[in-house]
Image (cartoon, helix red, strand yellow):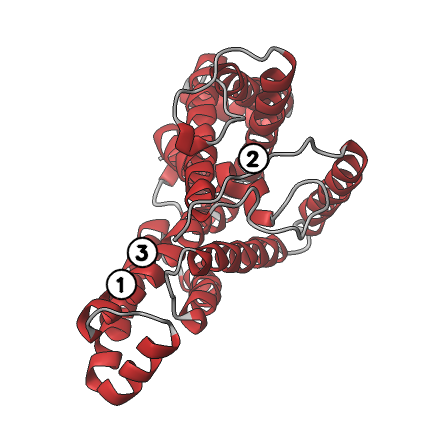
Amino acid sequence: MESKKVVNTPAKWWPRIISGAVILVLLVGCFFLRELSAYIFDLLIGAIMIICAYEVENLLHKMDRPTWSVSVGMFPVLTFIMIIIATNVGLNFYHFILLNLVILVAMFVILFAIPLMFSKWGNKCKVEDGHSGSLIYYSYSKAMNTIFVCLWPTFFLSFAFILNHFGYMSISDVANYYSSSGVDFGLFALVILFVSSMFADTFAMLTGRLLKGPKINLEKLGPGKSWTGLVGGIIGATIGVLIVYAIFNSIPVYNQLFSALGISVWAFFVGGIFSGIFNMCGDLFSSLFKRRAVVKDFSQIIPGHGGVMDRCNGLLVNALFIFIFFIILFV
């Protein structure tokens, strides 16, 4: 494939500000609706999963890497169904993760085997996808491409499901006790996740553009990435986590929780740093992926921002860290 050069044009601020405000209102609205049912927020996460998955899949197609689209769309639905089942039959988050992994393995085996079992149909698909290799290699690569999309972003985003129901899916007696006492671990975790990711993205953009600084010496990451922006993103996430901690610590039931477990502000300071690092890793991997596909954005669905995946590339990796962080603190 002939190499193309990605042209970066200055962002138009008004569409970016307006669409950003709409996203913020939608997000805050979902947090309020969550008081009616936590599953409402699961619907938001599920919608993000599906859109992000298809944005990643479209870029794979641009790179001549075919996928099984039905499976790409089916896995987020299965994940959503599993979180409903898990929370209603009393499964913990380890069961949920294990079920996800079992489904991924089973899906790979099935997607790899079916074109080989029905070779006539498999060869027809191979021709339609313009694949010149053997049927075995075609089946393997298409199955792997599909599982890649199911892992990134869907599997990573599934940790947001767990965070949403953390208090009730935890194996910790401490978490169960305080959940019954009025502590909403899910709300706390989700606020930390979204605030830290938003602060990381905003600070990375502002410090990178205002302070400039040395570029990250990796052409595959794109010309706009700088060490200043990277450090700014980590600082932003840390500030965001500390602000959330300060707000929740002012609420008596959360203050009692932190005091009883001996959790100080320093734990959240360190957590904020790692949250920023995970968020920036997600952003850098996303940039690498887009450069490989020779595009600037995953899509143009959000004016001034690009695709949903462009806004969630750090958040989905950060969701994994916040899950680990909460296990360390409360399990």
Q: Earlier in the sequence, mark 3 or mark 2?
A: 3
Q: Which mark is residue 180?
A: none
In terms of secondary structure, where does tag 3 sit? helix
In terms of secondary structure, where does tag 2 sit? helix
- The residue beneath circle 3 is 95
Where is residue 9 shown, x and y percent of the image? Answer: 66, 34
Whole-angstrom CA distance, mark 3 to mark 2, is: 22 Å
Tell me the kind of residue under disc 1: Ser
Whole-angstrom CA distance, mark 1 to mark 2, is: 40 Å
Q: Quick check: can you spot residue 73?
A: yes
For this view, does 63 lie left or right of residue 182? left
Instruction: Please tell me whether residue 267 is drawn above or below residue 323 in the rendered image.
Output: above
Tell me the kind of residue under disc 2: Phe
Where is residue 150 shown, x and y percent of the image? Answer: 39, 58
- The residue beneath circle 2 is 188
Comparing labels 1 and 2, the label whose residue is closer to the camera: 1
Residue lying at 26% horizontally and 67% vertically, measured from the top left: 108
Q: Earlier in the sequence, mark 1 or mark 2?
A: 1
Rendered-image quadrant of the C terminus: top left
Q: Which mark is residue 141?
A: 1
Q: Earlier in the sequence, mark 1 or mark 3?
A: 3
